[in-house]
Amino acid sequence: MIRISTIFIATCMVLVAASLGFVLYSVAGISGSESAIVALTALTCLILYNAVSMRLRDRSDVGSQIADLSRGTADLARQVAEFGRRLAAVEGRVASANSTGADRMQGMAGEINELGGLVRQLAASVAHHEDLLASGPAVQPVAAPMAQPVAPPRADLLQPMPPAPTVVFAPPPPPSPQSAISRGQAQLVGAIRNAIEQNRLDIYLQPMVTLPQRKVRYYEAVTRLRDERDQVLAADDFIEAAEAGGLIGRIDHMVMLRCVQVLRRLMIRSKDVGVFCNVSAATLSDPTHFTQCLDFLEANRALAPSFVLEFKQATFRNLGPVESENLAALSQRGYRFSIDHVSDLRLEPRELADRGVRFIKVPAALLLDTAQSAASDIHPSDLSDLLGRYGIDLIAERIEGERSVVDLLDYDVRFGQGFLFAPPRPLRPEGASATAEAPQANPQDLNGASTSAPVSSPAAPPRTTGSAALARRALGPN
């Protein structure tokens, strides 16, 4: 159907050509035939110009439509890929749930069989004792002896007895160092168990700030134990003993519980905050304690984007089939991982990103060490960019001087942690639901900018001593 605009343009072109011919005929004195030819020529030129301009406009419209169609096709392809990824995740989650349920059923069946065996052994032992009691001799009553007359003492019994030989007792040999160490470790395990049962497990928070703005973005939860005298036992002093005594799983479960409580309290004030929670390799490989932790984390999946689980570098380098499967189960539930205790820069970013690692903590001294940069495969100044290509953020920890901050900014490090910004602060006495103390009295003295750390009533920091003294005081007198 011809549009009204096209009819209007054609009418205008005819009028323009006729007017031109009329002007030439009446003003210039040109004959009528020549004026008609000129008018027809002008009309032809106008028609050609209109046709060319319409063709160019149609071509641009077609090009824009093709571009829109290409963008729509690309969006459709991305949506299909996203649906495929979600479907694969759902299938993996269903398979994991099925395998976990089968493992639990097998574990319960094994425990029931063990209980049945113990009951049968107990019944056999009771029957054996009953047989012994039935076949034993009857107890006869003992008659009281009759009084006998006292005989006079004999003469040979009145002779003096020879002196008893002298016995010299040698002092016991000193205990060997190994036995002393095992006895001390057993006492330390007992002290740790006592502290866990009496809820003397404390959580300290140390902030991680953005560089160079120095605004608090995350918190790391640091675990401490207190003895009966309220003296603090650092994590490095009791982790090995707790792992040897099988208590590290209970500690990690309690720490996770309190970290979630802290995160919920912090997110009331700001949504852009997260908490790092340390998890040991023993908990990752222990099916009983890991199942408890997994159930708890499953119930708090809404906090997964802000709750980061932190493991040591040695844990990721020594992963077995069980540990890898447990890490995959945590990653499927949306939890992200962090790596600390980094001893060298020999990293595989692609493999770590596939396992769910999103943060790597490297000591500032290791990043700025020229000898380490010569021994590693990549220069530390390029490490942040390399990790960023795979979605991993580099965090420089143990920063204690302003000079280190200046050098780390040249390496494009986005996050920093250390005593320069704030030391680990204990929670308020009412428990893990409270937030941490203010990092420092005057944050402007550090960076000249406000530090968005949550502020609460400060708690008096417990007394700290050396590692050996803390262990001795936690154990008490021998």
Image (cartoon, rainbow, N blue to C red):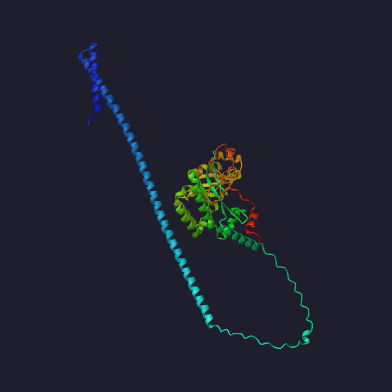
**What x and y, as percent, mark residue 273?**
50, 44
Front in this rendered view, residue 99 or 46: 99
Which residue corresponds to the image point at 28% horizontal and 25% vertical from the top-left?
50
Left or right: 114 as drawn, with respect to 161: left
* Any part of residue 309 in sight: no
Q: Residue furthest left?
A: 33
The quarter in which the N terminus is drawn is top left
Identify whether 226 is placed above or below 7: below
The quarter in which the C terminus is drawn is bottom right
**What x and y, as percent, mark residue 360?**
53, 47
Which residue corresponds to the image point at 61% horizontal and 41% vertical from the top-left?
401
Q: How many marks?
A: 0
* Any part of residue 25 in sight: yes
Identify whether 13 is placed above or below 154: above
Identify whether 53 is placed above or below 307: above
Left or right: 80 as drawn, with respect to 260: left
Identify whether 241 is placed above or below 66: below
Occupied quadrant, residue 46? top left
Front in this rendered view, residue 193 or 110: 193
Left or right: 75 as drawn, with respect to 354: left
Occupied quadrant, residue 298? bottom left
**What x and y, as percent, mark residue 116?**
46, 70
**What x and y, as percent, mark residue 185?**
61, 60
Front in this rendered view, residue 174 or 227: 227
